[in-house]
Image: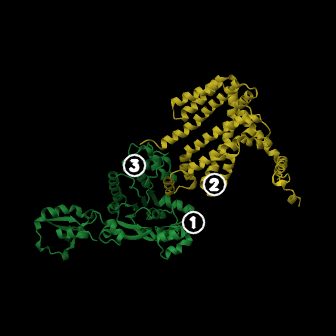
Chain colours: A yellow, B green
């Protein structure tokens, strides 16, 4: 009755009209953590182990050897393009040349990304395939992907911290959530874009679903899938940099340090190193897809 | 015996074809069905019988349902109602596994835009059907090489389809279809994307190959000249309905309705009609007036195109003989002029 006599609640949002979502989620999380924390412990240990061993291995190698490896990968994946190879080689060299400390930091960043991308590939490609094959899966997955791509990227750090604490593992979780949507979408698109007549040709010869997928659809969708992996890589890099806010080590924390100390030079130097790393990774992942694309549509 | 038997096939495209079926069966037209229900009638009560070893040409304009029809034979499309028998086996009764076996063993297909695998080399493309059948690699390479030689593409084995011209790509398509040695060859507008010279060349090549291989070929086209050149029998589709089936001569001389008439109006009859069709039978021809010195003997299957110069030049008479050499009839300028006059 008071509501009728005092209309002030219409002007200011009343305190009692509030859904206690925060409390529910916090309680839920707490129970969830108590019940299933042990499993996250396993995942944590496994991922951490993977990152550390990859990082240790790459740091242990002499830096000229690592540059040589990168150059060799680019050379073969780009179909022996000399220009691209030399360019990427120089970019790799320049990361360390900018500041000797950046070399190990870049390797640390790359290790976290690589593990993240591998997980993305294992989740993204099968999901993309099943989306291309079933309208139902597509309709169920698309809104989730839309949601994942609209939420600001650093929000993904929150559940990671809750479940895994600070460090590299929550960064990987956030990276996967953030970077996997384009790979899923492009795998789905790539398979659906394969010429219907080519699919019919395979069917007319009696190819089973498996033969069709492995022999025709996936190879022809490969340029798109590689584009997806390329997108995935770029997004993973940006996420790993942002993840320095939750204590992930790597090139990102150099930028963060520069910002905190108001040291413009330091931040710029680290920023440049990230750009160089981005170029190297971009060239490696693009070159392969482009080469297949060229073969499939050679000029007449 | 017929190799392929299509019985009262209906195909309706749309969300609920079963509900629309009875309306179509009661004789509703394509436009009416589309307007009232939003469904598209692909095929409307089509029945056909295709004999072993013949080239059956299915002709119609785009949207007439010819591509839909050919896909019923290897069940790339399931009919809404009706039966398809191949070698007296009901194709629709096969389960998923049997249908794959059936496609592998019985037939192969050639496509309008070739349908080649852009990521495979020419020889890998040709060997694809055998790869699906899990033939060992060296064996299938050997067979594929033989087919490549047969269509005259030696030297291109390790190129990719995009590096070849249209005509060459379709030869690869043909070689790929023949590599599995199928009983039935389905050709969906196989030569329509080629330019006229290459197309004519490919038609001749197909006829040559067929004279050796004796496959059952179902050939789809929108080009009447092509269907007359290739077909032993021709079926004409219009708006999903089969309006006429017959030998090329039947179609030309007795078009079933105005639609077919419009089609055959501009056809060069002399390239289609054969001596035996236009001749006067020996007992009905007054042979007393002919001059034996200007009489030429021709086989009954000769196209009258080849006879015209003879008859016109020296006012001669053609004596038509059958395979055994017996005279069966005569052709003079009178028979020729009658045959070449358009019926309206």
Question: Where residue B71 is drawn, which disc sits there?
Answer: none
Identify the image quadrant of the N terminus of chain A.
bottom right
Position in image of residue A273 (x %, y %):
65, 28
Q: Choose between A150 and A241: the one closer to the eye.
A: A150
Position in image of residue A220 (x %, y %):
53, 47
* SS label for mark 3: helix
**How dense is the environment of label 3, judged by Cα within 10 Å: few (below 14), some, or many (20 and up)?**
some
Horizontal side of residue B342 vs A25, given as left or right: left
In this rendering, the label closer to the viewer, 2 or 3: 2
Question: Where residue B166 is drawn, which disc sits there?
Answer: 3
Q: Choose between A94 and B57: the one closer to the eye.
A: A94
Report whether residue B35 is seen.
yes
Question: Where residue B15 is drawn, which disc sits there?
Answer: 1
* SS label for mark 1: loop
Residue at the spot 11% in from the left edge and 68% down from the top edge: B292
Q: Tell me which numbered mark, 3 or 1, is placed earlier along the sequence.
A: 1
């Amino acid at each position: 009755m008071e509501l009728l006599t005092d209309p002030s609640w219409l002007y200011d949002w009343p305190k009692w009209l509030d859904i206690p979502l925060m409390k529910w989620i916090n309680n839920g999380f707490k129970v969830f953590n108590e019940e299933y924390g042990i499993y996250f412990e396993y995942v944590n240990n496994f991922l951490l182990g993977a990152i550390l061993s990859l990082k240790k291995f790459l740091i242990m190698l002499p830096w000229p050897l690592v540059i040589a490896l990168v150059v060799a990968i680019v050379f073969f994946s780009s179909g022996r393009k000399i220009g691209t190879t030399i360019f990427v080689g120089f970019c790799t060299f320049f990361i360390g040349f900018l500041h000797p400390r950046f070399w190990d930091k870049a390797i640390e960043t790359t290790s976290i990304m690589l593990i993240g991308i591998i997980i993305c590939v294992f989740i993204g490609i099968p999901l993309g395939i099943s989306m291309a094959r079933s309208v139902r899966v597509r309709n169920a997955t698309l809104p989730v992907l839309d949601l994942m791509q609209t939420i600001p990227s650093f929000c993904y750090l929150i559940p990671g911290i809750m479940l895994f604490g600070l460090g590299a593992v929550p960064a990987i979780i956030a990276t996967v959530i953030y970077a996997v949507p384009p790979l899923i979408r492009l795998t789905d698109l790539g398979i659906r874009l394969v010429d219907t007549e080519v699919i019919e040709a395979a069917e007319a010869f009696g190819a089973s679903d498996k033969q069709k997928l492995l022999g025709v659809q996936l190879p022809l969708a490969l340029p798109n899938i590689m584009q997806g992996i390329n997108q995935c890589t770029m997004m993973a890099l940006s996420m790993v940099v942002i993840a320095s806010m939750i204590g992930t080590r790597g090139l990102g924390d150099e930028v963060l340090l520069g910002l905190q100390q108001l040291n413009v030079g330091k931040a710029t130097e680290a920023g440049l190193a990230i750009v160089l790393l981005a170029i190297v990774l971009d060239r490696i992942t693009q070159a392969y897809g482009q080469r297949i694309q060229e073969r499939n549509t050679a000029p007449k | 015996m017929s190799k392929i038997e299509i019985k009262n096939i209906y195909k309706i495209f749309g969300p609920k074809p079963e509900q629309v079926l009875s309306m179509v069966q009661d004789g509703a037209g394509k436009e009416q069905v589309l307007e009232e229900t939003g469904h598209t009638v692909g095929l409307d009560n089509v029945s056909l019988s295709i004999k072993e070893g013949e080239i059956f040409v299915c002709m119609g304009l785009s949207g007439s349902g010819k591509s839909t029809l050919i896909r019923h034979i290897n069940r790339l499309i399931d009919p809404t109602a009706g039966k398809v028998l191949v070698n007296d086996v009901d194709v629709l009764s096969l389960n998923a596994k049997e249908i794959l076996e059936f496609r592998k063993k019985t037939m192969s297909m050639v496509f309008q835009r070739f349908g080649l695998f852009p990521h495979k080399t020419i020889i890998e493309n040709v060997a694809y059907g055998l790869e699906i059948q899990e033939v060992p690699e060296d064996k299938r390479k050997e067979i594929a090489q033989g087919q490549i030689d047969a269509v005259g593409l030696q030297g291109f084995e390790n190129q990719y389809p995009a590096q070849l011209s249209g005509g060459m790509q379709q030869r690869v398509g043909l070689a790929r279809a023949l590599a599995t040695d199928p009983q039935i060859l389905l050709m969906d507008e196989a030569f329509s994307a080629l330019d006229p010279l290459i197309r004519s060349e490919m038609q001749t090549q197909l006829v040559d190959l067929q004279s050796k291989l004796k496959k059952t070929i179902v050939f789809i086209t929108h080009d009447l000249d092509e269907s007359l050149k290739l077909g032993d029998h021709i079926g004409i589709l219009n708006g999903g309905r089969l309006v006429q089936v017959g030998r090329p001569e039947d179609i030309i001389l007795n078009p079933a309705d105005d639609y077919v008439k419009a089609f055959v109006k501009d056809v060069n009859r002399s390239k289609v009609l054969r001596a035996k069709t236009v001749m006067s039978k020996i007992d009905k021809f007054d042979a007393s007036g002919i001059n034996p010195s200007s009489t030429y003997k021709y086989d009954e299957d000769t196209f009258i195109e080849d006879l015209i110069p003879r008859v016109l030049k020296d006012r001669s008479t053609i004596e038509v003989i059958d395979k055994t050499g017996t005279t069966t009839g005569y052709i003079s300028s009178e028979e020729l002029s009658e045959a070449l006059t358009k019926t309206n």
